Amino acid sequence: MIVTMARISKRLTPQANDSGETLGQRITRLRKERGYTQAELAGMMDTIQRLISDYERDKLRPHPEMIARFAQALKVTTDEILGLKPITGSGDIPNPRILRRMKKIEELPSAKQKALLKTIDMILNAAEK
């Protein structure tokens, strides 16, 4: 089931928060900080990439439920999506490439995980010297 829940914005210019960032710009920044493409985010939200693009370009205003889905997919609060509180720096966000690899490692059988982790430990120890 693909959910659209879009409303055409009645504003000619998107409304920005105190930092000057529009809702679409915040969604774009949060998505990129997490290393997701528009298509990946759309898949996580069970919608289509074109809607993500329209939201990011402030062509559409997301319905409140869609704002909640953005927040859930991007692992932030709805307040952060709406720009109602300070946004934490990107230093708090783990590297998405490393996270994807960790997920793949977790899917491996236990014996292969141990072998791979042993190899990683050897490489890290050598790099520290």
Image: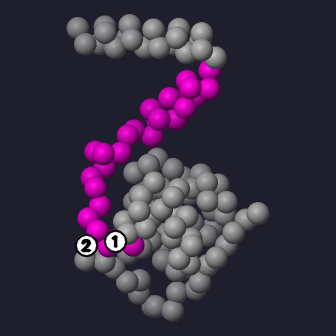
N-terminal of the pair, mark 1 or mark 2, is 2
Element type at marker 2? loop
Mark pair 1, 2: CA separation: 8 Å
Q: Quadrant of residue 53?
A: bottom right
**Image quarter hosting the C terminus:** top left
Is residue 101 rendered to the left or right of residue 44?
Answer: left
Residue contact at pointers 1 and 2, CB within 8 angstroms: yes
Q: Is residue 69 visible?
A: yes
The residue singled out by tag 1 in the image is: 83
Give percent across and percent down for residue 116: 51, 13
- Seen at 54% across and 52% down, the residue is 37
Asked if the magenta segment contains residue 30, the reply would be no
Q: Left or right? Give the position of 1 relative to 16.
A: right
Give the residue type that dot 2 points to: Ser
Q: Residue furthest left?
A: 129
Q: Residue at x 44, y 32 (%)?
A: 98
Other residues around mark 1 within 10 Å, as few (<14) / some (14–19) / many (≥20): some
Q: Which residue is mark 2?
A: 19
